[in-house]
C-alpha cells in the first residue's frame, strides 16, 4: 500500500501541531514510519486519504463497539444538531441518558457527565479526596487514567516509597500523594496501606488493564482490593473508560462481581463523541457541588450532541442481549486463528484476552503486570505492525495498547486478518 498523501499531510501538520498529532500515540514513534491520515470510516473499515481500505482493530481506541458511522448514532447527532449544538443549560436528554446508565451499571445511583476520560478520572480522585478527607491515592504501574498531574507518576525506589513525576510540569508536591503499586500483587498493595495508615483516600485501577496491552486481573485480585479498601476506609475506583459498556452491559463490576465506590466512563458511553462520566452511590456523589463541597464544572459537560450519540449507543447495547456474546465469540475466533499461525511459525508469543479486548505479546512468558508486559520483543512487534498495515489491517501502533473488537467485523474480516498474520511471518 502507498501512503504518499498521508506523508504529505503529516509534514504539513508538523509545522503547526506539536509532533504533527493531537495525541502522542498517533505519531508512530514506537513503531516508526508515518501516521495514516483517515478520510472516513464505515462499519469495520477505515478509508485513508490515499484510497486504502484498512480493517480496523482500534476503533477510535474503543468507542466503536458497533462499528464506525453506526446509523442510529449518526442520525441522533444530525437531528440534535439541527436544534442547536450547545446551550450551557440543562437539557432533558442529560437525565434520559443518566437514568439509562444508572439502570445498566450495578452499584451506582448518580452519574455526572464530563468531556473526556481524563476529566472523569481527575474528578473522581478529587471527589474521593474530598469525601474521605485524605490526600494520597494508590495507582498501579502501567495503568493509564489520563494525563492529569496525579496520574503521570512513575515508580520510586521501592514499593512503598513516593513516586516521582515522569513528565515535566508535574510537581513533586503532586507526586508525593500518588503511591505506585504493582498490578495483580495484593501483598504489595497491602504493604502500601500499612506504610500509609489513615492517609489513603482511594485506589484507582483499570479492572482490566488496557494501556500495557490487555492484562486481566488474577482470580481474587479485584475482590482483594475491595477488602483492603473496606479495611482501611478508602474508596475503590474502577476506571472503566475502556471496559465500561464494552465487556458487559454493566461493565467490569458486572463481569467480575466486585463493587466499586466510584466508576469512571468514556469511549462507548459517548458513542464516538467526546464524553466522559463518573458515577457512584448517592452518598458519595452528593459531595459534589452544587449540593456538596467538592467543586467540579464544565461549560460543555452534557453537550446535547454528545448526549444524543451516547444515548443512541447505550440504547442499542441495552436492547440487544446477544451483542456481548457475539463480541466474545468473534474475539475468541480471532485469538484461536492467530495462535494457530504463530504456533506454526514457531514465533514466541503470549495472547491475553478479556471479552472484546485482546493483545499479542511477542514473548512466551505470562503477562500479568507492567514489568512482564515489557518482556515482549519490540522489533518483532514493529515487523508485525507494519506487515499487517501492508496487508490492510490496522492495529494499535504500540505494543502497550490493546486491540478493540467491533461487532461490525464479519468472520470474513477475521479470516482476512488471520491470513494477513500468516503473510507477515511467511
Image (tube, rainbow, N blue to C red):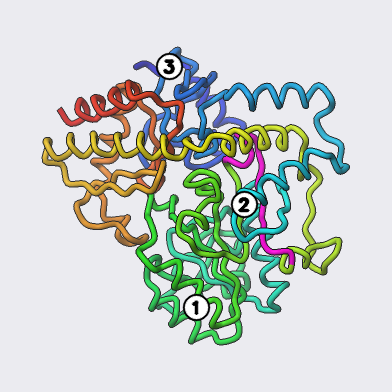
Q: CA distance from mark 2 to mark 1?
A: 25 Å
Which secondary structure, mark 3? helix
Residues rendered magenta in the picture: 268-282
The answer to which image quadrant residue 190 occupies is: bottom left
Q: Which of labels 1 and 3 is toward the front?
A: 1
Where residue 116 appears, as percent x and y from the top left, is 65, 46
Q: Nearer the viewer, residue 33 or 393?
A: 393
Where residue 198 appears, as percent x and y from the top left, is 60, 86
Kindly identify which residue carries mark 1.
Answer: 228
Q: Residue at x 78, y 65 (%)?
A: 286
**Which of the marked residues, 2 or 1, is nearer the chain's N terminus?**
2
Q: Label 1: few (<14), some or many (≥20) within 10 Å?
A: some
Side (left or right) of 389 relative to 362: right
Kindly identify which residue carries mark 2.
Answer: 118
Q: Quadrant of the C terminus?
A: top left
Q: Label 2: few (<14), some or many (≥20) within 10 Å?
A: many
Query: Is 381 colored magenta in this rendering?
Result: no
Where residue 33 appears, as percent x and y from the top left, is 38, 31
Q: Which of labels 2 and 3 is toward the front?
A: 2
Residue contact at pointers 2 and 3, CB within 8 angstroms: no
Residue contact at pointers 2 and 1, CB within 8 angstroms: no
Which secondary structure, mark 2? helix
Kindly identify which residue carries mark 3.
Answer: 4
Q: CA distance from mark 2 to mark 3?
A: 34 Å
Amino acid at each position: 500500500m502507498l501512503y504518499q498523501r498521508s506523508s504529505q499531510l503529516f509534514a504539513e501538520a508538523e509545522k503547526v501541531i506539536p509532533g504533527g498529532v493531537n495525541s502522542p500515540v498517533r505519531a508512530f514513534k514506537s513503531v516508526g514510519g508515518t501516521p495514516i491520515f483517515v478520510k472516513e470510516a464505515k462499519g469495520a473499515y477505515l478509508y485513508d486519504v490515499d484510497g486504502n481500505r484498512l480493517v480496523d482493530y482500534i476503533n477510535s481506541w474503543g468507542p466503536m463497539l458497533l462499528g464506525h458511522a453506526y446509523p442510529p448514532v449518526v442520525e441522533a447527532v444530525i437531528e440534535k444538531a439541527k436544534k442547536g449544538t450547545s446551550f450551557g443549560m440543562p437539557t432533558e436528554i442529560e437525565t434520559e441518558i443518566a437514568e439509562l446508565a444508572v439502570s445498566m451499571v450495578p452499584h451506582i445511583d448518580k452519574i455526572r457527565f464530563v468531556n473526556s476520560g481524563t476529566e472523569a478520572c481527575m474528578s473522581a480522585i478529587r471527589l474521593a479526596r474530598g469525601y474521605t478527607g485524605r490526600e494520597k491515592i494508590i495507582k498501579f504501574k502501567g495503568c493509564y487514567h489520563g494525563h492529569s498531574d496525579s496520574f503521570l507518576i512513575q515508580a520510586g525506589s521501592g514499593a512503598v516509597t513516593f513516586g516521582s513525576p515522569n513528565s515535566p510540569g508535574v510537581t513533586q508536591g503532586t507526586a508525593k500523594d500518588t503511591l505506585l503499586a504493582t498490578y495483580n500483587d495484593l501483598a504489595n498493595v497491602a504493604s502500601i496501606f500499612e506504610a500509609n495508615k489513615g492517609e489513603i483516600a482511594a485506589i484507582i485501577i483499570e479492572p482490566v488493564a488496557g494501556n500495557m496491552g490487555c492484562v486481566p486481573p488474577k482470580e481474587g485480585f479485584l475482590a482483594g482490593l475491595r477488602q483492603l479498601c473496606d479495611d482501611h476506609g478508602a474508596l475503590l475506583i474502577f476506571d472503566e473508560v475502556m471496559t465500561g459498556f464494552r465487556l458487559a452491559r454493566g461493565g467490569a463490576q458486572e463481569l467480575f462481581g466486585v463493587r466499586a465506590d466510584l466508576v469512571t466512563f468514556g469511549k462507548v458511553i459517548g458513542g464516538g463523541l467526546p464524553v466522559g462520566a463518573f458515577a457512584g452511590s448517592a452518598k458519595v456523589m452528593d459531595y459534589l457541588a452544587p449540593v456538596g463541597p467538592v467543586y467540579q464544572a464544565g461549560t460543555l459537560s452534557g453537550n446535547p450532541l454528545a448526549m444524543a450519540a451516547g444515548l443512541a449507543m447505550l440504547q442499542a447495547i441495552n436492547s440487544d442481549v446477544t451483542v456481548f456474546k457475539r463480541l466474545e465469540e468473534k474475539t475468541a475466533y480471532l485469538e484461536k486463528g492467530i495462535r494457530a499461525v504463530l504456533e506454526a511459525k514457531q514465533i514466541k508469543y503470549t495472547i491475553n484476552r478479556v471479552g472484546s479486548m485482546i493483545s499479542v505479546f511477542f514473548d512466551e512468558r505470562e503477562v500479568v503486570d507492567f514489568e512482564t508486559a515489557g518482556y515482549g520483543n519490540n522489533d518483532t512487534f514493529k515487523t508485525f505492525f507494519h506487515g499487517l498495515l501492508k496487508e490492510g489491517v490496522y492495529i494499535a501502533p504500540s505494543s502497550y495498547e490493546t486491540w478493540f473488537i467491533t461487532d461490525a467485523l464479519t468472520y470474513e474480516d477475521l479470516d482476512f486478518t488471520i491470513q494477513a498474520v500468516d503473510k507477515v511471518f511467511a
